[in-house]
Image (cartoon, rainbow, N blue to C red):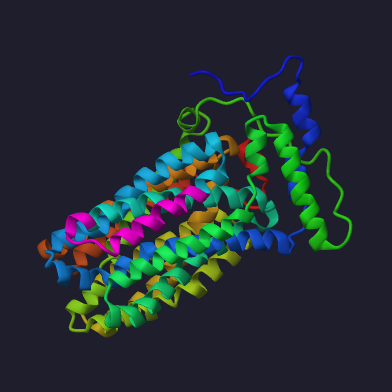
Amino acid sequence: MAEITGPATPGFDSQAAQERLNLASRLERLPLTRYQKRLFLIIATAWLFDSMDLAALTFILDPISAEFSLTGTQSGLLASLSFAGMVVGASTAGMLADRFGRRPVFVTSMLCWGFASLVAAFSWDLTSLLVCRFFIGVGMGAEFPVAQSLLSEFVPARSRGKYLGFLEGFWPIGFITCGAVSLLVVPAFGWRAIFVIMFVLSLYALYLRRAVPESARWYESRSRFDKAEQTIEYIENEVAKAYRKPLPPVDETKIPAQSTVQRAPISELVSRRYLPRTIMAWSLWFTVLLGYYGITTWQSKLLADSGMSIASSIGFVLLMALWGIPGFLTASFLLEKIGRKPVVIGFVLLSAILSYVYGLQTSPAGLITVGSAMQFVYFGMWSALYAYTPEVFATRFRATGCGTASAFGRIGALVGPLIVPLALSTWGHTAAFTVAGLSMVVGAIAVAFLGPETKNKALEEVAR
């Protein structure tokens, strides 16, 4: 394929311009101040709202099934359609973000799922709701890989794992918030009110996103050194204002510049140099999401089937999800202390074990007790997964790498909720959750043999 080298002018020395820019060293030496933390909170807020919308079906699947008289297969199809949309959103958004920039795709994703949520509130039958869930998935699928890439590109290596882990921590917060809202709203106003709330939140997140700049590292990867210089100067000025003292000096020799000469992103992913990392990321995401969503999508319905009311099942799922908060905090701390690989492998294996044990439970008390422990390790696993994935790819195709990994994950998430009712009806609870656990074990093995360690390394160092 044709090489993409960025804009060129007669007599322009791209390498010399990049060396003068010295972008990586300038970003890595910046202290963390309230400016970067504010950018993190903006990205994390949008992540939280997306997570709420994705989690909504966990709490409202039962009343939707009751209103439309859905069979188990139809309920599984509804649960899976948003993941089908996420396959499309994640795979295309990553490539678009690497070609046109992080920020425009980041902003557009919110419009897609926000307005699809509004239409879903007025769905009149299963087909219309399926279409809306698909487009909600497209918007959310576009959000996740771009947010990962953008955050990883402005947080220095010494704090990157922690903040990426904290970002995923907004998922259990979103899950819990959605559960609390559902507990209050669904009994009084019905499940449609949840989608209206999601639309209003999307507008607020869109307003907040105006303050997020484009990635300076992305500008550099496209050989747009003038824009990269303007952006890094702006960031340096904002950090200096918040820091209130002179910034640390730039280490002129610390970090080699990234390569700006590139093939198409997909070709880079399957090149001899990066193929092991790509196989690792795709395998990890597919297997983990298959197991995770195969279980959690059906949690409240399984509790309801055991004799609880809709309100009680929502309340107990919410109670279990609270354990996700110490889970993601623990993982975020360990990511910087012991490294990415041992944390990813450890939490994935613990998730596999507890998934199997969950399938052995037959009483509400057992489901709640083991489910709480399961949520602790699940959300620790997610924090490690989201922190690790953007680090293993180079800037010039990072969003594509994250997007395709996420797309493989959503395929797994699409399959998982369909497998569980089939396995439950054919072989029983134990077999269904054994499949979920074994799937996660495969992901852990892929990381052990194919994944690089990225702790305390600048993104440019990992890419080399």
Image quarter of the C terminus: top right
Q: Residue at x 79, y 41 (%)?
A: 254
Q: Is residue 457 above or below residue 170?
A: above
123 sits to left or right of 339: left
Magenta stretch encompasses residue 228: no
Quarter of the rendering containing residue 245? bottom right
Q: Residue at x 26, y 60 (%)?
A: 79
Looking at the picture, tell me which residue is in the foreground, 195 or 14.
195
**Residue closest to the far top:** 10
Looking at the picture, tell me which residue is in the foreground, 224 or 275.
224
Quarter of the rendering containing residue 10? top right
Instruction: Give coordinates of residue 396: x percent, y percent.
Output: 58, 35
Q: Residue at x 56, y 20 (%)?
A: 3
Instruction: Give coordinates of residue 62: x percent, y percent.
Output: 21, 72
461 sits to left or right of 293: right
Regarding residue 286, the answer to whether it shows in the image is no
Magenta highlight: main SS: helix
89 sits to left or right of 170: left
The magenta-colored residue range is: 107-128
Q: Is residue 202 above or below residue 156?
A: below
Quarter of the rendering containing residue 23? top right
Instruction: Give coordinates of residue 440: x percent, y percent.
Output: 35, 56
Count of numbered circles in the view: 0
Q: Is residue 123 above or below residue 67?
A: above
Regarding residue 183, the answer to whether it shows in the image is yes
Instruction: Give coordinates of residue 281: x percent, y percent.
Output: 45, 45
Q: Is residue 395 above or below residue 441?
A: above
